[in-house]
Amino acid sequence: MIFNIPKDILEMILSILPKIVEVAIVLVLGFIVGKLVGRVVTAIVSRFGIDKVIGNSSLGKTLKEANLTLSFLIGILAKWLVYLVALIVVADILQITTLSSFLNMVVGYIPYLISGFLIIGFGFLFADFISKIIVNSLREIGFIYTGFVSFFTRLLIYVIVILTALSVMKLDITVINIFVSAMVWSLAGGVALAIGLALGLGFKDMIARNAESFLKSVNLMTSRLNQEVRVKELEGEIKRLEDELTIFRKEKERESEEKRARLEVLSKPVENVEDFLNKVVGSTGKVARIYGGYEITILDPTTFPWCDIIVTMYNMGYDVWISKKDNKYYISCKLRTE
């Protein structure tokens, strides 16, 4: 049986056939490229070890319970981004303006979506990190209510992170802010009501014990802080004394070196003994020759170079005597006879 296709219908089919082929090619290529990009991105992110980094965090544990990994989710996001680009190309080929505009809007919103999820991911990691630091610090100083502190610290940071992420995602968070405020006030009211019921129902002893335990914990924490401050002050004082002792030792070593050098100078032989004596004695005494040596009349005992004269003359082979006559001191030096 032979069908006679009207010419106008045949022309319409032939006119849209290239577009159908183009759409098919774009869809197939988009599907293949999207799959490939998703796998490559997943492998790259996984190789960087991001799954291990967040493994012990609350976000990592949540993903693990759902049998998911962060690298897998990022790969899926990359894959669907390629799919959306392919759909935009298809909409442009088919000249479907509404669909093309919608898909362009979706693709344009994706950076805000990614930014929001990144803020949530890193914010949750930051919350866990800060919570661990605070808990470890409180445990070191003996604070016993670390569980409550950890819970409320994480809750506070989680709320701030989520509100920030939603704001980055261009979402209206006015209602959420109202809800969060109501939740906080409800929590405060619940705590106040619980305290009132505890007092009214006769749990005074339990509250007193807990209060006493809390006060002891605070006192212990304060005592340890004071001890740490005192230890730091003592360490500073010890450091200052060590510095002073080091300076004192250096001065003593310098003085010893000077004395040693001076002694070496005094031990050297002198060519002209009389000139040496006159030069060293100066105005503090008077040098005179005597048989076999010299006699020095000391005019100013307080400034007279006793050590220089005695050591030098003795090292040059002179016997040295000190005498006193008429309230004056005399040094007699005669060559030593062997």
Image (spheres, helix red, strand yellow):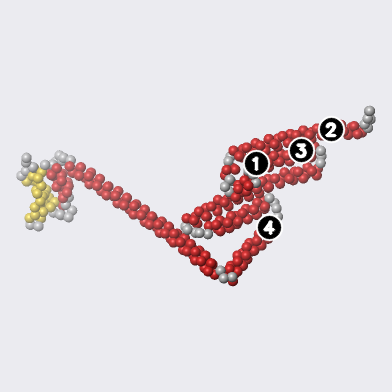
Position of residue 98 measured from the top left corner of the image (x, y, whole percent): 80, 44
Residue that label 4 marks: 176
- Amino acid type, label 2: Leu
The residue tagged 2 is 17
Residue 148: x and y in percent read 56, 58
Q: Residues within 10 Å of mark 3 (few under 14, many from 20)?
A: some
Q: Residue furthest top?
A: 1
Residue at figure coordinates x 70%, y 45% from the top left: 110
CA distance separating discs 4 and 2: 51 Å
| Amino acid type indicated by mark 3 | Val
Q: Which circle's residue, 4 or 2, is located before the other in the chain? A: 2
Q: How dense is the environment of label 4, judged by Cα within 10 Å: few (below 14), some, or many (20 and up)?
A: few
Q: Is residue 218 above or below residue 255?
A: below
Q: List x then y, in percent, for residue 68.
A: 64, 44
Q: Residue 262 placed where, x, y %?
A: 21, 45
Give the numbered dot on residue 89. 3
- Check if mark 3's residue and mark 1's residue have beta carbons within 8 Å: no
Helix, strand or loop for disc 2: helix
Question: Which of the two marks, 3 or 4, is nearer to us in this view?
Answer: 4
Q: Decide: marks 2, 1 in contact (CB < 8 A)?
A: no
Q: CA distance from mark 3 to mark 4?
A: 37 Å
